[in-house]
Amino acid sequence: MSYLEWFHTHANKHQVIVQKLRAQNYTKEMIIEYFFFENMVEKEPEFCLLYTNKQKCHDIKNLNCYLCACPHFRFNDKGLSVEDGITRKSECAIASKKSSEFVYEKVVHLDCSACIVPHTKAFIDKHFDAEWKTIMQKCFVTSPIKSDLQ
């Protein structure tokens, strides 16, 4: 699955849950609370593949899954840049020291598993929008590929 496919699929799953909660008159605070990992595993097991094994993507005590991706994540399935024949498809907009990279089949991918920035209640509260795509709008980068040949 491409980054863009995941992005749209996840946005749709997120929207269904938020709409269900809003129909039950959940407040912003109640919605944020609902998205804590333990609750989501129990009540929304289809939201994340890791929920099947009650596995967290980030090893933190109060993991909140509201954002399930970071607004600082940048991606383009065609590539953000190419250097020495290696295509970079994702990167961190804030260059977090907690992020790392891995190369698979000549593609650089961002590994955010050590970073907890978007999974804290305080961060979510500060950036909250009932529409996940609004928070994440800068993630998909549409600019052309930068190449070491240019």
Image: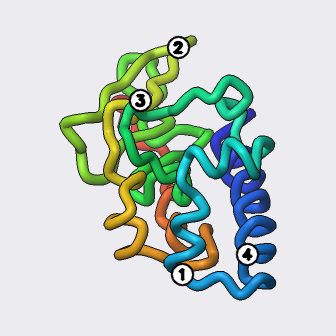
Q: Which mark's residue is nearer the viewer, 2 or 3? A: 3
* Residue bearing the label numbered 4: 21
Expressed as whole percent of the image width and height from the top left, the position of residue 137 reads: 53, 68
Residue on which disc 2 sits: 104
Q: Which mark is residue 111?
A: 3
Residue 144 shows in the view = no
Mark 4 or mark 3, earlier in chain = 4
**Tag 4 near tag 3, CB within 8 Å:** no
Residue 143 picture location, percent across and down: 49, 57
Q: How much space separates mark 1 and mark 3, taking CA atoms? A: 29 Å
State how far apart marks 4 and 3 are (Cα): 31 Å
Q: What residue is at 48 percent from the left and 44 percent from the top?
A: 145
Q: Is residue 83 above or below residue 137?
A: above
Image: 78 above or below 22: above
Q: Amino acid at mark 2?
A: Tyr
Mark 2–mark 3 distance (CA, rounded to whole Å): 12 Å
x 44%, y 20%: residue: 86
Q: Secondary structure at mark 3?
A: strand
Q: Quadrant of residue 127?
A: bottom left
